[in-house]
């Protein structure tokens, strides 16, 4: 399955790193600085009464598989426990912070 010329051009020009507001980051060092800032990286986190931990973070790195998908730069994960970090029970990637917060609320309710 060959790559179409327009697909190759798209992949070369498409940004890979994005700020929380969805704007592209051109400098990987800027992405690294933001990623290292835990206040910037963590969007929401909740420890549930059953000990499970729901964490939504900004990754800033596009996790989209298909080139025509919007950049998926947020990740919500449900862990079996917070400390020591438990195994992953469910995970979802989101394109916007608003979507990520909605998914966070949905997963928190689902895994209570």
Image (cartoon, rainbow, N blue to C red):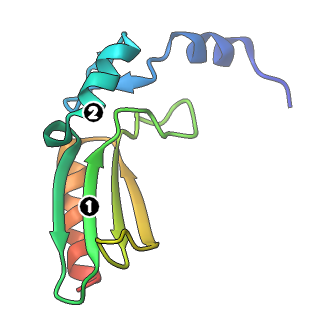
Residue 8 location, quadrant: top right
Residue under the point 17% across and 49% down? 43
* Secondary element type, mark 2: helix
Image x and y of residue 34, in percent:
24, 27
Residue 51 location, quadrant: bottom left
Residue under the point 40% across and 16% down? 28
Which quadrant is the N terminus positioned in? top right
Q: Which residue is mark 1?
A: 55
**Number of residue marks:** 2
Q: Is residue 87 above or below residue 29?
A: below
Q: Which residue is mark 2?
A: 36
Q: Is residue 107 left or right of residue 87?
A: left
* Front one among 37 and 102: 37
Marks 2 and 1, how far apart at CA: 16 Å
Residue 84, disc:
none
**Mark 2, residues whose alpha carbon is within 10 Å: few (<14), some, or many (≥20)?**
few
């Amino acid at each position: 399955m060959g790559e179409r010329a327009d697909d190759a051009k798209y992949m070369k020009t498409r940004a890979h790193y994005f700020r929380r507001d969805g704007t592209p980051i051109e400098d990987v060092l800027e992405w690294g600085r933001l990623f290292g800032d835990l206040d910037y990286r963590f969007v929401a986190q909740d420890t549930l009464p059953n000990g499970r931990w729901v964490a939504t973070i900004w990754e800033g790195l596009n996790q989209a598989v298909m080139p025509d998908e919007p950049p998926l730069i947020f990740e919500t994960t449900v862990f079996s426990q917070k400390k020591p970090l438990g195994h992953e029970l469910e995970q979802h990637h989101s394109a916007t912070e608003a979507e990520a917060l909605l998914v966070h609320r949905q997963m928190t309710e689902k895994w209570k």
